[in-house]
Amino acid sequence: AERIEPVDLHLSDGRAYQSQTVFRRDEAGESAGWIVRLADITTLTAAMRQREQALQLLTHDMRSPQTSILALLATTPDLPEDVSDRLAACARRTLALADGFVQLARAEVTPVAMEPVDLCDVAVEAVDELWPQCRQRHIEIEQEGCDAPLMVLGDRSVLARALVNLLGNAVKYSPEGSRIRVSARATREDGRAFVDVSISDQGPGLSPEEAAMAFRAFQRFDRPGSEAAGGVGLGLAFVDAAAARHGGGVLCASAPGAGATFTLRLPEYRPA
């Protein structure tokens, strides 16, 4: 059977249908006719439209007032400093929440544009992006295993955001003057080839119960003395969704007081 790409039909009265066609052949390879399936996708189309409107609300209508608040605070020096700082923190948190929710929603449902990607190269870019924060807090980053390309099929921008989230999470929970290790390697599991990028920190670590919940949306683990108190709990949920969309997963190995290692594991790509 030969399938033809589905065609969406949108009528002027708001109804929507999807046409799917399959060309059939008999045992001798001769034409045996067509199978045409017409599905009513009006409700699905309306739900997708509402989702896009909600994302638009978050990306623009919620961001604009918070950005204006920050701009006003920057140009209003006569406010008490503690009041100004609290207002700015609330505005930044709202911005982070809106951005994180939009990124997560799109990672879960938006089709990913698959192309060959060197995951080592993406990891190096993530390190470069977080380097200023690490330098400010005297955190050293060690990189291992990126001497040769390690290829996967994926959306480079989504994978870059996933690794930035993992590394940013490590930076938040790392004490000043500590070390973070970023390592990449090819591995095999159940006869399948994978590429692993692991990020290990020397932070407070997680209990087994916390590790099991780490990838839930809005899950946060506040630790005294860490920089994670201002987080919104969507970064690791995005990583989990992005890994799943790429046919992979994300692993967590940790123990209280022993730091944490998060590993992004994706199927290795080997050109034919």
Image (cartoon, rainbow, N blue to C red):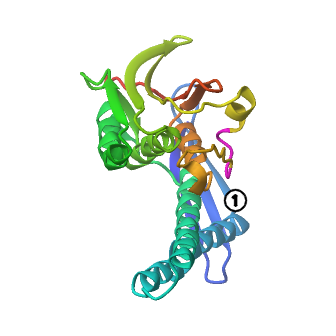
Q: Residue at x 38, y 24 (%)?
A: 183
Residue 138 image point, x, y percent: 35, 40
What's the magenta region? 214-218
Residue 151 image point, x, y percent: 34, 28
User: From what the image shows, is residue 224 above or below residue 97?
Assistant: above
Tell which of 250 and 257 is nearer to you.
257
Tell which of 117 and 1 is nearer to you.
117
Residue extending farthest to the right is 209
Secondary structure found at label 1: strand
Q: Is residue 229 magenta?
A: no
Residue extending farthest to the top is 191
Judged by its main secondary structure, the magenta piece is: loop
Q: Quadrant of the N terminus?
A: top right
Q: Quadrant of the C terminus?
A: top left
Q: Residue at x 46, y 41 (%)?
A: 171
Query: Mark 1 sits on what residue?
Result: 39
Q: Residue at x 61, y 30 (%)?
A: 205
User: From what the image shows, is residue 29 above or below residue 83?
Assistant: above
Indicate the amino acid at tag 1: Ala
Side of 121 where 225 appears, left or right: right
In this rendering, does residue 108 appear at all?
no
Residue 257 image point, x, y percent: 61, 26
Side of 18 where 269 appears, left or right: left
Which quarter of the picture shows residue 114? top left
Side of 134 where 54 appears, left or right: right
